[in-house]
Amino acid sequence: MTDSNKIVFFGTPGFAVASLDALLQAGMNVAAVVTAPDKPSGRGLQLTTTAVKDYAVAHGIPVLQPLKLKDPAFVEALQQIGAALHVVVAFRMLPEIVWNMPPMGTINVHGSLLPQYRGAAPINWAIINGERETGVTTFKLKHEIDTGDILLSDSTPILPDDNAGTVHDRLMLMGGALLVKTVKGLFDGTIKEQPQPADAGTLKHAPKLFKENMRIDWNQGSEAVRNFVRGLAPYPAAYCEFQGKTMKVFTVSLADYHETPAPGRFVVDNGRILAGTADGWLSIDELQLEGKKRMDAGSFLRGYKPA
């Protein structure tokens, strides 16, 4: 039997914890949490738990950790809970048998202003593409990923010195607040669903990040490279090759140098590591060379021996 205000929450990382906490702080009836299974980690292969599970256990919320979301036992468990609404924040794709189960449907909190930046890495790609604004959107799940009817949205500027980490943390809190507002509006019937516009102009996508699309292209202009580095910092981090080794780059800044830049050329000059781009020089200010710790350029150069 369905409970008219019961919620099942689906989430895994810390980003989702903020939304789960916001629901609880608002007095919402979170009947259960669904998160990823524990997995072995580290040299001892000890089982590690997700941030959402840790929070749920600490607050006495029942936890479900199915290996497969179509597992009949898991589906039966959800049916027994009888939630009116499912809420998804930073979780894997749900099968229709799960997202279509509750009478009020399933809603998602997405880290972009939909319909722009549908996909797995919306925060990263908005910064990489030089956007000056982003935000969070709540919407109803349907078959095609991130295309469901929009419920509410909230925006925030992307500041010149923001990176993926600072925007992530801002959207994490905004997402929790917007989720509470959305759930309340759904329960009291004050929110009207709005289909995502079919004629939204050129859609920008947010594909999953792989090593292949995290490599710095020094043939781009300095501002584009700087945005690329910001969009991947502090994690998973943009990278390049330096002295035959992989170097992660966390922070760069525009720099002056008397020679004409050659894309991909590195120069050590007066305590700086300079990299040439298509239209200028960048100073690599924070880095991590393969096998070393993350450090500022000055610390790196004090132990640096040119090849």
Image (cartoon, rainbow, N blue to C red):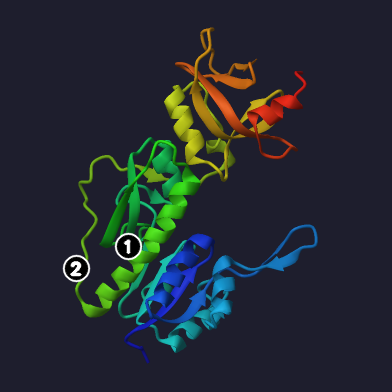
Q: Position of residue 46 (x, y in %)?
A: 75, 66
Residue 293 lies, in percent from the top left, at 71, 40
* Label 2 neighbour load within 10 Å: few <14, some 14-19, many 20+: few
Q: Is residue 269 above or below residue 304?
A: above
At x 71%, y 68%, the residue is 47
Q: Secondary structure at mark 2?
A: loop
Image quadrant where residue 251 sits = top right
**Which residue is at the front of the view, 97 or 132?**
132
Residue 205, position as x, y percentages in the image? 38, 44
**Which one is in front, 299 or 169?**
299
Quarter of the image containing the C terminus? Answer: top right
Q: Residue at x 33, y 64 (%)?
A: 178
Q: Residue furthest top?
A: 259
Residue most toward the bottom?
1
Looking at the rendered image, the quarter that the N terminus falls into is: bottom left
| Number of callouts | 2
* Residue 145 % position (x, y): 38, 57
From what the image shows, is residue 223 above or below residue 256?
below
**Residue placed at 50% from the left, 48% from the top?**
165
Q: Secondary structure at mark 1?
A: strand
Give whichever of discs 1 and 2 has the lower sequence position: 1
In this view, 149 is above or below 134: below
Q: Mark 2 is on which residue type?
A: Lys
Q: Is residue 281 left or right of residue 1?
A: right
* Disc 1 to disc 2, C-alpha distance: 12 Å
- Residue pointed to by mark 1: 138
**Other-residue count near label 1 (Cα within 10 Å), few / some / many at <14 / 14–19 / ≥20:** many
Residue at label 2?
192
The disc labelled 1 sits on which kind of residue?
Answer: Thr
Q: Which mark is residue 34?
A: none
Q: Nearer the viewer, residue 201 or 68?
A: 201
Q: Answer whether labels 1 and 2 touch (C-beta < 8 Å).
A: no
